[in-house]
Amino acid sequence: AQSVTQLGSHVSVSEGALVLLRCNYSSSVPPYLFWYVQYPNQGLQLLLKYTTGATLVKGINGFEAEFKKSETSFHLTKPSAHMSDAAEYFCAVSDGGYQKVTFGTGTKLQVIP
Amino acid sequence: DGGITQSPKYLFRKEGQNVTLSCEQNLNHDAMYWYRQDPGQGLRLIYYSQIVNDFQKGDIAEGYSVSREKKESFPLTVTSAQKNPTAFYLCASHRGEVGNQPQHFGDGTRLSIL
């Protein structure tokens, strides 16, 4: 069975500071990993995904994530936070094929001016 | 532009009433999903369908029903048996295998009890 844990339901950073949102997963096979962003009263949008290959994945809006198999982690980072980054972020994992995707409980990012 | 349309954006349900949430996609995706979102609980899978005229229960299917008569449409009915229906409902779709393809989401329907 697959599962995902997001550490920290709320994270606050100052504008211009590093953003680090943590995600740890559990999967019985090599996982497929995703980060999505959700703005208030909207659906989720894909930020980036890891399937195979390069472990450092670059996404939209300057975000990137690194797949670390030994740590079962897929943390999301951005070097410099912008006010527009304030949103809720979801990590998701799948075992591949036609298995369903499991979402984490989300992390709300607050950016302080 | 292709996408997923959910309607209505806001919906109110009276006691004992069934209500239906609409989800339409023009992305030509085979697979469609319904999720329920509650604060602090992330997204929980209600039902999913990988092909027309076929669907499977997700983790929290009790009190909900779906149909998939057309590829483009996957309506969700919240029945009177669902005692705590207040939530944000999201419809999603994807092409190919869910494991390596991102899901596309609609903008949700917020359901409340009157």
Image (spheres, rainbow, N blue to C red):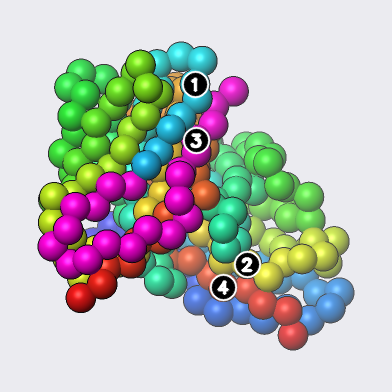
- Secondary structure of the residue carrying tag 1 is loop
The answer to whether mark 2 and mark 4 are in CB contact below 8 A is yes
Return the residue at label 3: A4
Sequence-wise, which precedes: disc 1 or disc 3?
Answer: 3
Q: CA distance from mark 3 to mark 2?
A: 22 Å
Return the residue at label 4: B110
Q: Quadrant of residue B25?
A: bottom left
Q: Quadrant of the C terminus of chain B?
A: bottom right
Q: Mark 4 belongs to which amino acid?
A: Arg
Residue B109 in view in this figure: yes
Q: Nearer the viewer, residue A15 or B111?
A: A15
Q: Residues within 10 Å of mark 2 (few under 14, many from 20)?
A: some
Question: Is A7 above or below relative to A99?
Answer: below
Q: Mark 3 belongs to which amino acid?
A: Val
Q: Mark 1 belongs to which amino acid?
A: Ser
Q: Mark 2 belongs to which amino acid?
A: Ala
- Secondary structure of the residue carrying tag 2 is strand
The answer to whether mark 1 and mark 3 are in CB contact below 8 A is no
Q: Quadrant of residue A85?
A: bottom left
- A83 left or right, relative to B92: left
